[in-house]
Image (cartoon, rainbow, N blue to C red):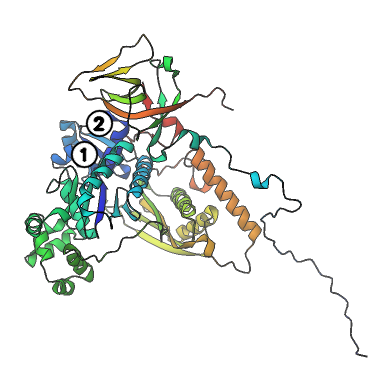
Amino acid sequence: MPIALVDCNNFYVSCERVFNPKLEGKLVVVLSNNDGCAVARSSEVKALGIKMGEPWFKMKDIAKKHGIIAYSSNYTLYGDLSARVMSILSNFSPKQEIYSIDECFLDLNGFDPATLMAYAQKIRMTVKQSVGIPVCVGIADTKTLAKLANHCAKKLFAGNDGVCDFGMLTGIERSTLFARIPVGDVWGVGRRIAERLAVMGIHTVEDLRCADPELIRQQFSIVLERTVNELNGHPCIELDEVGTPRQQIMVSRSFGSPVMYLDDLAESVAYFTTLAAEKLRQDGSVASSLCVHVRTNPFSEREPQYQSSKIVALSQPTDNTTKLVKAALNGLNEIYRAGYRYKKSGVLLMALQPKGTIQPTLFDDPVEQAKSDNTMSVMDRINRKMGKGTLTIAASGITKRWAMRRESKSPCYTTEWSELPEVW
Amino acid sequence: MQQSILFPALVSQAIRIPLFSYKVAAGFPSPADDYIEGRLSLDEHLIHHRDSTFFVRAKGNSMVGAGIFDNDLLIVDKSLTPASGDIVIAVVDGDLTVKRLIKRGEQVILKPENHRFKEIEFKDGQELQVWGVVTSTVKTFHKG
């Protein structure tokens, strides 16, 4: 059963390049929230040896020397382009699993194996032309192998023109290829597991493929045993189709500068809850409880450290921003301690269920409920039309002293009328 | 005869029971009901491929002859394959530009629709990168 993994190349950088073709061939990085570290690098930057997650302040000298262009992350843009790419990809298979913002699995069962390479090329061409994002395609019989095939296509280990189909390899070719790839490149094998595997003499993908699954389960876990089976072409990880609503929704950010007072902290928590509630309504779900958390900066070693979280149960599952914010602020009040410099806060909406399935209680007021639904849908519509945060509840603040640092963010080319690309 | 005891009804405060707030249409059904169709949607009219359609803002006067003026909104479909005569968004020196695409044999030209601007010619070896095909413009005369 062939599965394809389609993965966007240097996705955030590619998004920036769609609307700014001048960046083509240039050294470009996209920085994380608060411009902390590199979260996407163009191939030219990768060639310089700059690692994923490298702190920006450490890179600044090299950046200056080589003329690296740095962008603050523009998740609004990346999110929109991702949705377009995923929607186009969904036309290529009846079954799609969106695995992350820039990659998805496609079930290619039933396709003639001989035509898969050409089909994958068509996928690449279509996405490149329609959205402007380059992608690579890996094809194999299991998800783990498809991930690896994609890795091979990207790193030019195998396949051609950004497509690698393990189905085209003979057993010997595959073994030779796998023997060249370090085991740490396998999906689900982290650095720590790779170190422990090395002790057992397992260094390459081929070593792991030939390992005794039984032994791997005893020494590690059933998860890694599955990986071994998947490397041998026995599917163990099902394709998770889209449509399953999220089980929880997390909105959490680091602040641009540390925050000390409850007022500022409360603003941030209210704002994050507002964002989470919007996502909740998009999914058509309601939350039964939520968890608020705050913490200081663990890297400021000389400062007093504090972190805490609080779960707040809601009397009734709800998707109402006002009710959720109230609950979140109650939680915050309990965990806030004065005298600390807080660096991060966040809200996790939990125990989500589809809105239609909730059991009304005796004390529910349908009129109130309808009113609340109306208010929320008006709020969502206005924010969609006039831009995020146009209509918000006062608790989430206006000055936002805690807001993220995003010094060089590109315009929201596809979601704001005032920021459209200009053509001459 | 069976005796029945009658109690006076207890008159207490009315209890408010919430009703469903959804409206149910009563009275005669409208004779038009069977003929109601969705309102016309500009999105549907102007956008044929949602995922590959982008809006861009025209700047300058190079295309006034084609009816494209400064600040007009252009609707661009990236999925279309450009043909000679199409108005396209092309990449020239890293900038996005709107011009008419003309192909004469091997020769490819980006033609402005304003005699004060020069044609951009692509000779052999020079590759023209088309970003998308302009399908419509939207002009606003009154902000409403």
Q: Would residue A418 be found to the left or right of residue A30 on screen?
A: right
Say if B101 sits above or below A5 in the image.
Answer: above
Q: CA distance from mark 1 to mark 2?
A: 10 Å
The kind of residue tagged 2 is Leu
Q: What is the secondary structure assignment of the residue under circle 2?
A: helix
The residue nearer to you, when weighing A229 against B86, is B86
The residue nearer to you, when weighing B6 against A303, is B6
The residue carrying mark 1 is A42
Say if B86 sits above or below A269 in the image.
Answer: above
Q: Are marks 1 and 2 on the same chain?
A: yes
Q: What is the secondary structure assignment of the residue under circle 1?
A: loop
On the image, the x and y values in percent for residue A258 come to 36, 47
Q: Are marks 1 and 2 in contact (CB under 8 Å)?
A: yes
Q: Residues within 10 Å of mark 2 (few under 14, many from 20)?
A: some
The residue carrying mark 2 is A23
Could one spot residue A257 in this view of the protein? no
